[in-house]
Amino acid sequence: MHPHRQAPWFSLAFVVLAADQAAKSTIDATTPLGWSYPVTAFFNLVHVLNPGAAFSFLAGAGGWQRWFFLAIAIAASAWLIWMLRQPRPRSESLAFSLILGGALGNAFDRALRGQVIDYLDFHLAGWHWPAFNVADIAITLGAACLVLASFTASKQPQAQEKA
């Protein structure tokens, strides 16, 4: 694949990383830890730290999880970069780009802050979904794109990106 055909996918990953870090830096610089601001009846902006993984998995594990999740993010990012350098359908490239940007965003937090800043809090009737961030949204959207791509790929012959 020609490098100019890869540029949009790496650019998208960079935009996700930049948007994620800009939002986290703004929350970190302008609000105290533990802050919560009700935006709607079901949504708050918050400032919380997550030392674990998605949905605070292993958050109370004692500190070793920082390095474990950072190593996973670095390894996954290297694999995603390699995958994006290969010819593949646009839907897969979109998915890998979103996941790469999100993985790098959360890895950046783990490396520099030791924990991930989360700030989006949805709730209903006293029940709160675990707080999350732009990186988490990108990873989730990327995973959903891969699932959708797997359904369409099984119905079509090996259609590779040619343009």
Image (cartoon, helix red, strand yellow):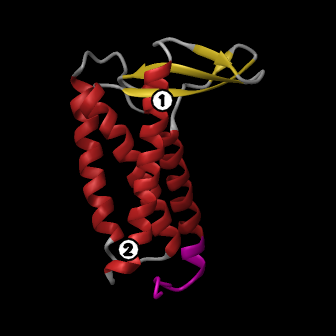
- The region drawn magenta spans 152-163
Residue 41, image x, y percentages: 78, 21
Kindly report the secondary structure that dominates the magenta region of the rendered protein.
loop
* Rendered image quadrant of residue 83: bottom left
Is residue 161 one of those drawn in magenta? Answer: yes
**Relative horizontal placement of residue 92, taking residue 86 as reference (left or right):** right
Q: For the residues marked 1 and 2, what is the alpha-carbon distance in whole angstroms?
A: 30 Å
Q: Is residue 44 visible?
A: yes
Residue 17, x across and y down, in percent: 41, 48
With respect to residue 101, does 134 lie above or below?
above
Q: How many marks?
A: 2
Please, what secondary structure does the residue beneath circle 2 have?
A: helix
Q: Position of residue 123 (x, y in %)?
A: 68, 22
Q: Quadrant of residue 108?
A: top left
**Between residues 156 and 78, which one lies in front from this camera angle?**
78
Q: Secondary structure at mark 1?
A: helix
Residue 115 location, x and y as percent?
34, 25
* The N terminus lies in quadrant: bottom left
Judging depth in this view, the residue of 68 and 151 nearest the camera is: 68
Residue lying at the far front of the rendered structure: 30
Q: Which mark is residue 14?
A: none
Residue 87 visible here: no
* Mark 1 residue type: Thr
The residue carrying mark 1 is 26
Would you name the residue on which mark 2 appears? 6
Return the disc, 1 or 2, that comes first in the chain's sequence. Answer: 2
User: Which is more toward the observer, 23 or 77?
Assistant: 23
